Amino acid sequence: MGRQTTIYDHYKFLTKEELDRLNLTNLIGTNVLRAYMHGFFINYKLYKKTFPKFLYQMKLIKSIYKPNEKGYC
């Protein structure tokens, strides 16, 4: 018996807070996001393109504000 596919197999579910963190709230109301219950579905390929940029930005911010030996930023 083969794996049954659903309409949302190629989508990633994100909450509003996750969209905020990924800076994707401007896509709300477009056909790129599909509203569902307490969040949205986004095409998985688009999510995979966006997420590495987000991780890079977070690492950059952490390295800039990393405390030195005296505890200062």
Image (cartoon, helix red, strand yellow):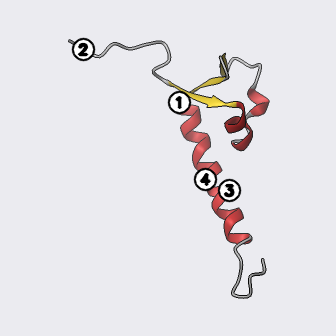
The dot on residue 2 is 2
Q: Nearer the viewer, residue 66 or 38?
A: 38
Q: Which residue is mark 4?
A: 55
Identify which residue is drawn at 62% across, 41% down: 50
Identify which residue is drawn at 48% across, 23% down: 10
Q: Seen in the image, is 39 located left or right of residue 28?
A: left
Where 53 sits versus 71, above or below?
A: above
Q: Position of residue 21 (x, y in %)?
A: 71, 43
The kind of residue on which mark 3 rests is Gln
Separation of residues labelled 2 and 4 (CA atoms): 35 Å
Sequence-wise, which precedes: disc 3 or disc 2? 2
The dot on residue 44 is 1
The kind of residue on which mark 2 rests is Gly
Sequence-wise, which precedes: disc 2 or disc 4? 2
Where 34 sits versus 48, above or below?
A: above
Q: Seen in the image, is 49 located left or right of residue 67?
A: left
